[in-house]
Every structure is written in structure tokens, then in C-alpha cells.
Image: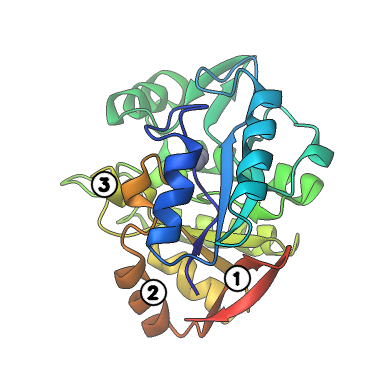
Amino acid sequence: MLSNIHTHSTFTDGKSTPEEIVISAIKKGFISIGFSEHSYGPHCTYGIKDTEAYIAEIKRLKEKYKNEIEVYLGLEEDMFYFCDRSKFEYIIGSCHYFRKDNAYFPIDSSLETMEKVLNDLYNFDVITLANDYYSTFCDYILKRKPDVIGHFDLITKFDENDSPLFFNNEEYLKLSEKYLLEALKADCIFEVNTGAISRGYRTTPYPYENLLYLLKKEGGKITLTSDSHHHDTLDCNFKESSKMLKDIGFTHTYVLHNNEFIKAQI
Ligand SMILES: [Zn+2]
Ligand SMILES: [Zn+2]
């Protein structure tokens, strides 16, 4: 059952229009497609400017293509600025920034920015940085209970290189697992997000494998998403990631169908 609920379009930093995306999803045989533009926030440079126009366009497409595909209106909410949740059919809750003394620093823009943040704000202490990130994010998750938790370990985006900050650090791996157990209390769906693969940063999805094994062990709910910014990448790496999830022991993911998240066999 093909579906993707993490999709960006020209309303924010995506390259394709919503209609191009819907048509592509139909061609790929999707049962549903969910749009999740970046929410508006004063701190967020790529947040949506015209939320009402976005809502109107997705509703138009939902009606126009209702006999071919289910179209859903979602939003990727940045945790530092709450949206009006009643306007959307679901929200993905994500953390894209470090916040220190009311200044915001992007987590996922580049390795250079990450290293600068690590150096300037954390004196190169990876564990304190990770602890800050996960504790802030988990507070939000438990309070807000978004339908879906976006790229839980985004801070590892640039870690597939010769000198990883996190993946070879036992203390970090244990810390991320502690916070995963904390986030699980909110009973949200975790996304297994292939977005960094389509953009060439990673060969595996978020979250990292230690967290996926723990999610499986704890009975956590997952949905496979592409965090797509182009109509060609709606199902990027879905085959490979599905196989990986199966190998880990998952038997199903959650997809949006008939206005609810239902279990679909992998
Ligand atoms: Zn995101
Ligand atoms: Zn996204």
C-alpha cells in the first residue's frame, strides 16, 4: 500500500507544484498522498508564507482527484512555533533548530553550521548538544503529541563521513535510546524518513538503526516517508527501506487511508 505523508511543494522549499506531485503519486500507484509544508514561524526562513492559499490549493486537489487518490492536508510543524492544528488533518512535529538565548541555529543546513554550533555553543561537547536537542524535542513531543514525529534524530544528518560525531559514540547511542523511550510515551507514530537519501547526505533513513531496533522491540508505530521536495522522489528508497524494516522485524507500517492511520503490511 504505497503512500507518503511527508511532502513539500513550491509553497515552501519544494521544487514541484502540489498538482505535479498529485499526478506523480497517481502514476506511481499511491493510495494516498499527504502534504506537509513547513509551518510558519518567525524564526524559520523557509516556513510557509501564505498558509490560507496552501490550504485552499490542497483542498482543491483533494476534490479534483478524489476518484484517483486520497489527498490529505497536513503540516510539518516546527516545534518552536505552534500552528492552528484545527486547520489540518494531521501534523508532523519536527525540530529543525537549536535555540540558545532566543537565537536560533539550523540543525540540518550544513555540516559546517553544525560544527560551528558545536564549537561556539557547546565547546565541542557532542553529548551536551545531543542532550539539549533530545530533551527539548521530547518535551515538545509529550506536550503536543503530534500525529507523527518527524526525523527523530535529525542531528545525525551529516554523520555518514570519515569522522562521525554520533554513530561511533557509545554514550551518544545510549542517550538517544533513553530519549526514544521517553518519546514513545506520547504514543505518536515515528516516521522512517528517507529524505536525506534523496538529497545525497545519507544511505540510510532516520532514525539510525539502533533506534529502529529499539522501536521494534518496544512496539513503536512507524510510517515510511520520503520528506520529498520533488515529484520524482515521492517513493525514494522505499523498496530498500522496506526490506531493511522487514529484516529488523517490522511487519507493518502506518498509512493514511479513509481519513485515519491504518496498519499496512510491509
Ligand atoms: Zn523537517
Ligand atoms: Zn520536511
Q: Is residue 219 left or right of residue 224?
A: right
Q: Mark 2 points at which residue?
A: 242
Task: Tell me how far mark 1 sits from mark 2, CA to CA.
Answer: 12 Å
Name the residue at 33% across, 50% down: 233
What kind of residue is marked 3?
A: Pro
- Pick the residue in front: 164 or 232: 232
Q: Name the residue under label 3.
A: 164
Q: Mark 1 points at which residue?
A: 254
Question: SS of the residue at dot 2?
Answer: helix
User: Disc 3, disc 2: CB below 8 Å?
Assistant: no
- Pick the residue in front: 260 or 96: 260
Q: In which quarter of the image is residue 165?
A: top left
Disc with the residue nearer the chain's start (1 vs 3): 3
Q: Is residue 163 left or right of residue 80?
A: left
- Pick the residue in front: 76 or 141: 76
Residue 257 lies, in percent from the top left, at: 66, 68
Q: Mark 2 near ligand 2 (CB under 8 Å)?
A: no
Q: Residues within 10 Å of mark 2 (few under 14, many from 20)?
A: some
Disc with the residue nearer the chain's start (1 vs 2): 2
Q: Residue furthest left?
A: 162
Name the residue at 29% across, 48% down: 198
* Residue 87 visible to the viewer: yes
Name the residue at 50% across, 22% down: 46
Task: Tell me how far mark 3 sits from mark 2, CA to CA.
Answer: 25 Å
Q: Residues within 10 Å of mark 1 (few under 14, many from 20)?
A: many
Task: Tell me how far mark 1 sits from mark 3, CA to CA.
Answer: 31 Å
Q: Mark 1 near ligand 2 (CB under 8 Å)?
A: no
Q: How crowded is mark 3: few (under 14 residues within 10 Å), some or many (20 or more)?
A: few
Residue 260 lies, in percent from the top left, at: 73, 66
